[in-house]
Image (cartoon, rainbow, N blue to C red):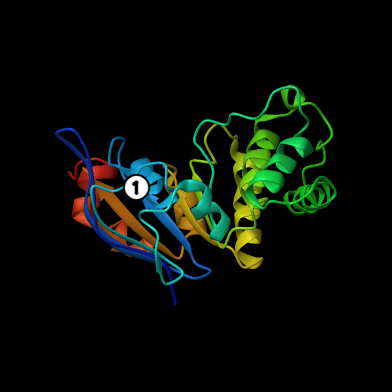
Amino acid sequence: MQIVSTRNLVKKFGGLVAVNDVTMSIEEKEILGIIGPNGAGKTTFVNLIAGMHYPTEGEIIFDNQNIEKYPPHIRNRIGLSRTFQVVRPLQGFTGLENIMVGALFGAGENLIQARKTANEICDLLELENRNQPIDKLTVLDLKKVEIGRALASKPKVLFLDEVMAGLNSDETWQMIDLVKKLRENGITIAIIEHVMGVIKELTDRVIVLESGKIIAQGVYQEVSKDPKVISAYLGEED
């Protein structure tokens, strides 16, 4: 069952076409990989679905309703959430308190409910240093806090934007296991990622963007052998 889909989605910034006639879907409870070279339009595409930008043309359907005109906070309330490439936690707060903010404003919970929700999320994410100030946390823990804030609004669909960036090999595998656990908890995942090993390990299906267009889609084993993908993303063929 499709939970998110786009139809002929276009985003123009002046003369630049950042997203060009993209029609795609995300199936409920799948992990979808979104890949492509730098400047391919991946983050802009996610921003369109999350409401950071509004499309120039086209439709965005979430849970059987057109949402392309909804502001981001409404999209968040009905079940769409996302992380950001650059983690910007609230300084002067603990990891737990940062996640509480997501529950307070994303889910509209009161302080007691928000603390309970945040602790449950910390348990799920195995964030042992939840009560430490943000500036004392490791890169991995900061990534967990970023995901935790997104989870606090109780999303049906979670977009992850390069959550593996800056992690070492062991931390990357911990994050892979964590993303799998989120799917086991019923959350649909779409992940932007540059590390092909992560995409291969995690995803059920992949879409490849180049210059704002989808040039290939399917399972990783097929997409990774597509000549257009090899040329655009993995390097020119010999």
Along the viewing direction, whichever of 139 and 81 lies nearer the viewer: 81
Q: Is residue 125 left or right of residue 6?
A: right
Looking at this rendering, what residue extends furthest in the bottom direction?
1
> Residue 162 location, x and y as percent?
48, 41
Q: Count up the numbered dots.
A: 1
The residue at 30%/40% (across/down) is 37
Q: Nearer the viewer, residue 78 or 36?
A: 78
**Residue 17 as seen in the image, left or right of residue 168:** left
Residue 71 position within the rendered picture, expressed as x and y whole percent measured from the top left: 44, 48
Q: Residue at x 59, y 51 (%)?
A: 176
Is residue 167 depicted above or below 183 in this figure?
Answer: above
Q: For residue 146, say whether it is visible.
A: yes
Residue at disc 1, secondary structure:
helix
Amino acid at the residue labelled 1: Phe
Q: Position of residue 231 (x, y in %)?
A: 20, 45
In the depicted structure, whether residue 234 falls above or below residue 34: above
Q: Which residue in the protein does label 1 denote?
A: 45
Q: Quadrant of residue 89?
A: top right
Mark 1 closeness class: few <14, some 14–19, many ≥20 residues within 10 Å: many
Residue 214 located left or right of residue 96: left
